[in-house]
């Protein structure tokens, strides 16, 4: 994790109980992102270590882009866990998209714990050169 990653502890009302009956507070991590913009659109990279495709949910609704994921941190069978700061972290982050972007053409890929989202601009929102005539 980078120094800019934010941790948020759930409120006490969100305390759940595990199979042994012990309370466990959920931890939500705001993933660090890099965003690059050009005339074609925006590319977003989000750090999601330990997240697999089946535990990842990316949605767009009413111009809100939401990333929601659960990391899987396996413990080897021959080891006993004595201490864990974040056992199975939950990642969540939401972005508001401008109407200039075509949400129907967003592409997503996940590789080595990094989610890459390509968000293209609408054709009419892309810059275009206007030819000037003389005479």
Image: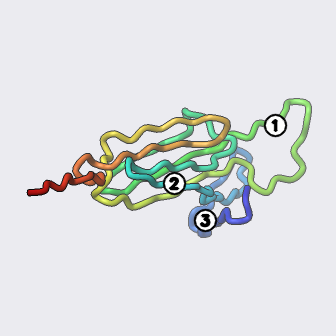
Pick the residue in front: 78 or 131.
Answer: 131
Disc 2/disc 3 C-alpha distance (Å): 31 Å
The quadrant in which the N terminus is found is bottom right
Task: Give the class, few, some or many, for how many residues have Cα within 10 Å of label 2's Cα (few <14, many ≥20).
Answer: few
Residue 4 appears left or right of 126:
right
Residue at (48% x, 48% y) in the render: 43
Q: On the image, numbered disc 3 is attached to which residue?
A: 10
Residue at (79% x, 57% y) in the render: 85
Between label 2 and label 3, give the one nearer the viewer: 2
Q: Are circles 1 and 2 on residues that touch, CB within 8 Å? A: no
Task: Give the class, few, some or many, for how many residues have Cα within 10 Å of label 3's Cα (few <14, many ≥20).
Answer: few
Mark 1 or 2, nearer chain start: 2
Q: On the image, numbered disc 2 is attached to which residue?
A: 36
Find numbered disc 3 in the image and state the secondary structure of the residue it sits on. Answer: loop
x, y (%) of residue 24?
Answer: 70, 57
Residue 30 appears left or right of 73:
left
x, y (%) of residue 119?
Answer: 40, 46
Mark 2 or 3, nearer chain start: 3
Find numbered disc 2 in the image and state the secondary structure of the residue it sits on. Answer: strand
Q: On the image, numbered disc 1 is attached to which residue?
A: 75
Look at the picture and state if 90 lies above or below 8: above
């Amino acid at each position: 994790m980078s120094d800019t990653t934010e941790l948020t502890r759930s409120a006490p009302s969100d305390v759940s109980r595990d199979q042994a009956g012990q309370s466990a507070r959920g931890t939500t991590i705001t993933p660090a992102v890099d965003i690059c913009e050009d005339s074609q659109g925006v590319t977003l990279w989000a750090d999601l270590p330990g997240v697999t495709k089946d535990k990842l949910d990316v949605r767009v609704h009413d111009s809100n882009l939401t990333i929601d994921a659960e990391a899987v941190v396996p413990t080897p069978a021959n080891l006993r866990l004595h201490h864990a700061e974040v056992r199975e972290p939950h990642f969540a982050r939401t972005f508001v998209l401008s109407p200039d972007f075509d949400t129907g053409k967003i592409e997503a890929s996940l590789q080595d714990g990094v989610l890459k989202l390509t968000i293209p601009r609408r054709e009419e929102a892309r810059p275009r050169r206007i030819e000037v005539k003389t005479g």
